[in-house]
Amino acid sequence: MQTLKTTSLEVRDNQLWILDQQALPQQKNWLPAHSVTQLIDHIHALRVRGAPLIGLSASLLLALLAEQGQTRAELAQALEHLRAARPTAVNLMNNLDRMKVALAQPAFVTALTDEAWRLVQEDKQLCDAIAEAGCTRIKPGSQLLTHCNTGGLATAGVGTALGVIARAHQQGWIKNVWVDETRPLLQGGRLTAWELGELAIPCTLITDSMAASLMARGEVDAVWVGADRIAANGDVANKIGTYSLAVLAHYHQIPFYVAAPHTTLDRHCPDGAAIPIEQRAASEVTGVAGSFGSVQWAPETARVFNPAFDVTPAALISGWILDTGVVTPDQVQSGFFQPQ
Ligand code: MRU
């Protein structure tokens, strides 16, 4: 395969490498993702994360394994193992469905390489199109609030919600971005604050509990988040804490936008209640770990609830910003996301 470099994925010497998103921003470590076991381990540990990126990394690895001589049967098994690596983000399943079609071709090695390559190039274009569409909803002098990380780290391109913000910044429209630190794994504090800094976009880090008082003070003009899955009725699964922001935005009459590529859409999932929500280890809530070390503050015996995602009902969403354009609540209610 040709060499490839995105913000957090690399193909070189016919092997896949990932930028360790758990070590950022203190360390920039590129780690091998040369086998299914290695990649699944990175995905579980969120060293590779973000809905689009998970799907792309799995697709690239499959293509590379095919080039290295794995049989069709071995690749079919690898595909199913990868598909189960994280349950909520549907981009993984959508991308692997396309890879499965390629695997069924007589010349499956070339077909898999071409398809993985196409998925990466498409993702870049999708991000650009989302940024373009999203900018129509941003006013000059905006203070925006974002949650988790939806930037170049999470995609092959400029990102989804963060791509919109970056494009609006290029127009000179961004006064400030409030960055929710995003407990428990701190994707906002560690990754978004870092990405916005690299892009020289003015931003201010807050803990998740500070959003309400900022909204009450009139200091948030809109909330912009990404998505891990959009159901047919417009409900959206995204990083835990997104739903609280949507409720707060609704109460304060602030627009709440979801930006995502069409690969995040699951027309066969009727509503948010049918989206599988990943439950994660108690240790992520009882303490924190990273390149800085680890600390535990809660009693070892504390009972913990740790869902990685929550569901925001469609009724709280002001617009779904897709690569195909802005989808309005009226369109969603009229069945825009229903199976075609
Ligand atoms: O657990 P993560 O860090 O993979 O969760 C990521 C999110 O929730 C993002 O908002 C979503 O995947 C969109 S990334 C463009």
Image: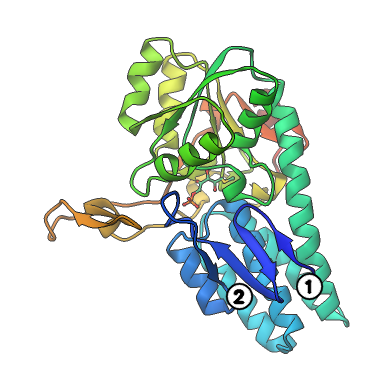
Residue 245 in the image: x percent, y percent? 42, 29
175 vs 288: above or below:
above
The amino acid marked with disc number 1 is Met
Q: Nearer the viewer, residue 302 or 141?
A: 141
Quarter of the image where the N terminus is located = bottom right
Q: Nearer the viewer, residue 144 or 261?
A: 144
Residue in view at x 45 percent, y 21 percent:
249
Residue at the disc numbered 1: 1
- Circle 2 packing at 10 Å, graded few (<14), some (14-19), many (20+), is few
245 vs 59: above or below:
above
The amino acid marked with disc number 2 is Glu
SS class, disc 1: loop
Q: Nearer the viewer, residue 14 or 264?
A: 14
Asked if residue 327 shows in the view, the reply is no
280 vs 113: above or below:
above
Residue at the disc numbered 2: 80
Choose top left, top right, bottom left or bottom right for residue 299: bottom left
